[in-house]
Image (spheres, rainbow, N blue to C red):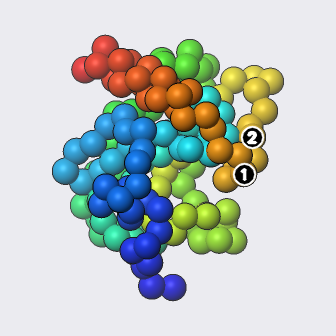
Amino acid sequence: MAYDDSNIFAKILRGEMPSFKVYEDDKTLAFMDVMPQAEGHTLVIPKFPAENLFDLVPDYAVAMALTVKRLAPAVKKAFDAPGLMIVQLNGSAAGQTVFHIHTHIIPRAHGLELKFHAREMADFSELKNHAARIIEALGESA
């Protein structure tokens, strides 16, 4: 399948759709998932038109990994999570629903069940608060 630049993440990158941004550099953008599986569910995307890992050029794959590594401790701290689930899906058979490569950072705790993926929209004021918590924790770790 060819990359479709009308996907929601491409629109977010172009500023055509809003997002609750937590981090941005020249090659990546990180923001809150609007259909989170847990509080603090954060997405990291490259600023490169790739549907999946197989289409992503190495420089952007490295940049995305570095952004995940930078953000993961802040997400963990902001939500006092004993663990994190870091997931990257490739293709609809793997569960990918937005066809712009992205990595999920999801806070986890024993006994905390995940919500279903891409089913329920979160309250935007809550997402704004979650983004602020991560940004604060990111600043503390800098």
Three-letter code, disc 1:
Arg
Q: Quadrant of the C terminus?
A: top left
Determine the CA span between mark 2 and mark 1.
8 Å
User: How far from the left and from the top, in percent, is residue 67?
Assistant: 33, 42
Which SS class for mark 1?
A: loop
Name the disc covering residue 119, or none. Answer: 1
User: How far from the left and from the top, in percent, is residue 43?
Assistant: 47, 45
User: How far from the left and from the top, in percent, is residue 114?
Assistant: 74, 37
Residue drawn 37% across the image and 39% down it: 21
| Quarter location, residue 37 | top right
User: How far from the left and from the top, in percent, is residue 105?
Assistant: 52, 39
Mark 2 and 1 residues: CB-CB less than 8 Å, in contact?
A: yes
Residue 55 is left or right of residue 25, and the answer is right
Residue 91 is left or right of residue 31, and the answer is right
Name the disc covering residue 115, or none. Answer: 2
Residue drawn 36% across the image and 25% down it: 135
